Image (cartoon, helix red, strand yellow):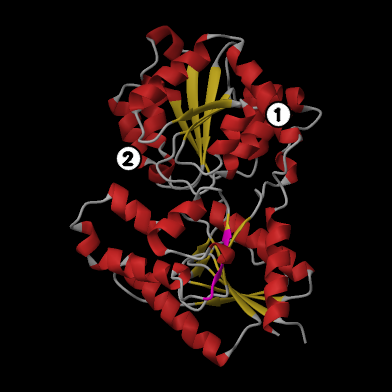
Amino acid sequence: MKPELAFCLFKYFPFGGLQSDFLAIASACQRRGFRIVVYTRSWEGDIPDGFEVRLISANALSNHGKALRFSQQVTEELMQRPAAAVVGFNRMPGLDIYFAADNCYAAKAATQRGFLYRLGRRYKTYAALEKAVFDPESATEILLIAERQQAEFCQYYGTPAKRMHLLPPGMNRNRSRPDNAEEIRRTVREQLGVRKGEIILIQVGSGFVTKGVDRSIRALTSLPSELKKKTRLLVVGKDRSAAFRRLAKKLGEEDRVDFLGGRDDVPSLLLAADLMIHPAVNEAAGIVLLEALAAGLPVLCSAACGHAVHVERSGGGLVSPEPFDQEWLNRSLLKLVSEATTLPALGRAGLAYAEKTDFYSQHERAAEFIADVVRRKS
């Protein structure tokens, strides 16, 4: 009988970054001969062949209450049905391995929230779930997806370094720039109704508040009138867009911002664009930044993104320092789109860096690590 792996995550839906990493790692484990059982509160989309999905009700009035109930109910189920290893993509007790798809919650609460927030039940619940993973007395092995994560977790929890393991990025190879990139670019720009000389900004990701879509809209609307008339922002991702549409309308530029929803043709859209803008508020990694570099697309992002280090190292774009400054972003966007030669030069630099850097092996390396943990436990 195949050894069983329990994968735990709050929600699965197509187009989510955490969800994509989960699916790729679980599939890599399945190819290694493991049986995959997924514990989740909800699943949208097709279930891969051979996966067993167990829906956990986790009834509660609040999100933090649901998170707590989920962890409790999964623990109860695993007592009745033990797994060879328990792999979590959200923080909870009882994990053998945690994939750190999110940055340190305690650090965010300390630096971005007030004292009263840290007295509330929401904070105490999420902090306790995180502590169960990172406490020095915990046995959970932690897979990191960005270099800076280790310092934060060590600072707030004193987590032993030997339990933290940095993975390379996990970009899909189909995101690399194809030989017919220029042909695809022309076709997609024509489909999008892009005029000659028009500059296309693109932002990709679900969770528009966290991704800083409002910052991108404000930067676009800060451009001088003549330049603004030939610049458009495409927002690609699954989230509620009403508040951001109202912001664009309030700033008088609703016709310059297009919300395309979740798409499965992101590689083609990246080739059609002229600049990726991604001033995220909080982004543990930001695989879309690497996808842009590998497509030859320049990047303007915030230092809050874990993969911003690759933008800096490549010379393929600009990184806004923290704390975030909207005026810096506005000036930088103006600088990048004002000169016709700037963006192509940055795109070439990013592409050259991507061609010699491992952007791809995260999921296979994670699966190898999980298999090793199973061997050590058995």
For the point 41% across and 64% down, the residue is 157
For the point 47% across and 46% down, the residue is 283
Q: Which of marks 2 and 1 is in front?
A: 1
- Disc on the earlier residue, 2 or 1: 2
User: Which secondary structure, mark 1?
Assistant: helix
Q: In which quarter of the image is residue 25?
A: bottom right
Disc 2 to disc 1, C-alpha distance: 35 Å
* Relative height, residue 249 to residue 46 (above, below): above
User: Which secondary structure, mark 2?
Assistant: helix
Q: In this view, does 43 lie to the left or right of 281?
A: right
36 is within the stretch colored magenta: no
For the point 63% across and 78% down, the residue is 85
Q: Quadrant of residue 24?
A: bottom right
Give the amino acid type for the residue marked by disc 1 in the picture: Leu
Q: In this view, which residue lies farthest toward the bottom?
A: 80
Instruction: Tell me, yes or no, if residue 161 can be seen here.
Output: yes
Give the amino acid type for the residue marked by disc 2 in the picture: Ala
Classify 10 Å Cα crowding around label 1: few (below 14), some (14-19), many (20 and above). Answer: many
For the point 48% across and 18% down, the residue is 231
Relative image position of residue 14 (x, y in whole percent): 57, 55
Q: What stretch is highlighted in magenta?
A: 139-143
Classify 10 Å Cα crowding around label 2: few (below 14), some (14-19), many (20 and above). Answer: few
Name the one closer to the observer, 193 or 153. 153
Q: Which residue position is annotated with label 2?
A: 243
